[in-house]
Image (spheres, rainbow, N blue to C red):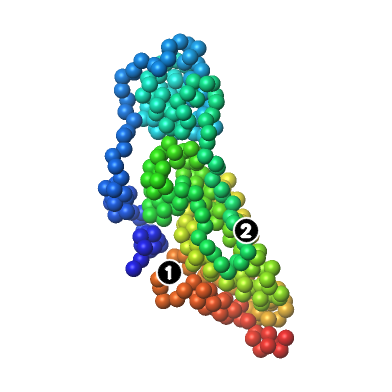
Amino acid sequence: MLSRVEQALATRSGAGEEFRDAETCDLCQDRRRARPPRRRATRTREEPPITDPTPDHRSALGLAVRALRHRRGLTLRQLADVLGVSSATLSAIENGKTGVSSERVAHLAEAFEVPVDHLFGGAGDGPTAAAPSRSAPSVEDWRHLPPLELDAALAGALSSFLEFGYHGATMRTIAERAGLSVPGLYHYYASKQEMLVALLDLTMHDLRARTAAALAEGHDPVSRFTNLVECLALYHTHRRELAFVGASEMRSLEPGARERVAALRRAEQALVDVEVEAGVRAGVFATTRPHEAARAVVTMCTALAQWFRRDGAATAEQVAEQYVDFALGLVRHDTSRAAQG
């Protein structure tokens, strides 16, 4: 029986298929039914400020709010949305132009995840959670791929991007799947674009470390080529969720990040190109079109994320072994010459 994530992958892998509506998703409905009602920020009449609303006091509070917002990487609009106020109201608070009710101060403290008294101590910041790790683990055995330990925010983002696609996911659906409040999510990441970039960076750095280790074990073009193919096949089966988002959401990256990630992908392709060309020069690969053969091999491996199922007829390791044979056929490996050597 397919997991819900795998069902989502299967639903989204069809060409031209629209993303499923967030309101009709079974998983989202289950989560909505299960979670307790959440108190929403509402616009109410101003209550008396918790201290004397002198101009100096308002100015100090405004400076603290602006400093905390900048440290969290939030825009005025983003924080206003979290608080349920207009940008104009938040701007007036930051500029010391309006009094602030005790309820709104509590909302501000919750949004920044700091004690209330930190809002009245200038720009002081309260204790913050450690920044989530975005670096891939070191690789001791490139054939062994234990689950990556994503922080809660990235795990929620990955789940949402798989289910709804990048543009269908919202910060609220990501927060729900991460088990965080929306303000808590903003505490770690300023936007879902930042989370997408973090996921793709992690994917590419993890893959690059593994392909480098696979290459290091090879001693000639054939062994290096087959190690690369096995590594790519294993990665796109064991890490299929990350690989699927990496392939399908490249178009959702902003230009600078898109070019950087694309360069990393081209570098991975170049590793295979080099070994195929070396095999042709050594006379062990008989293809007359090494560039096209290398591209076909990599495309074949990356497509595994679209159809591989962990409960399918073959394991990831069995599929990788099959794909090595397919790849050797594509480059027309001369087995008789290899046996003589």
Q: Which residue is at 55% across, 41% downward?
A: 130
| Residue that numbered label 1 is attached to | 310
Q: Nearer the viewer, residue 225 or 94?
A: 94
How many marks overall? Answer: 2
Of helix, strand and loop, which one carries label 1? loop
Check the picture and name the quadrant holding the N terminus.
bottom left
Q: Which residue is at 65% across, 84% downward?
A: 334
Q: Could you tell me residue 33's position as x and y percent?
A: 27, 48
- Numbered tag placed on residue 138 in the rendering: 2
Q: Could you tell me residue 267's position as x and y percent?
A: 64, 60
Find the distance from the CA under tag 1 to the CA under tag 2.
25 Å
Q: Could you tell me residue 6's position as x and y percent?
A: 39, 62
Q: Which residue is at 38% across, 21% downward?
A: 102
Check the picture and name the quadrant holding the C terminus.
bottom right
- Going by the image, does 161 lie left or right of 205? left
Asked if residue 312 is positioned above or below residue 125 in the image, the reply reads below
Asked if residue 37 is positioned above or below residue 311 in the image, the reply reads above
Q: Amino acid at mark 2?
A: Ser
Q: Could you tell me residue 307's position as x and y percent?
A: 43, 68
Asked if residue 185 is positioned above or below residue 66 in the image, the reply reads below
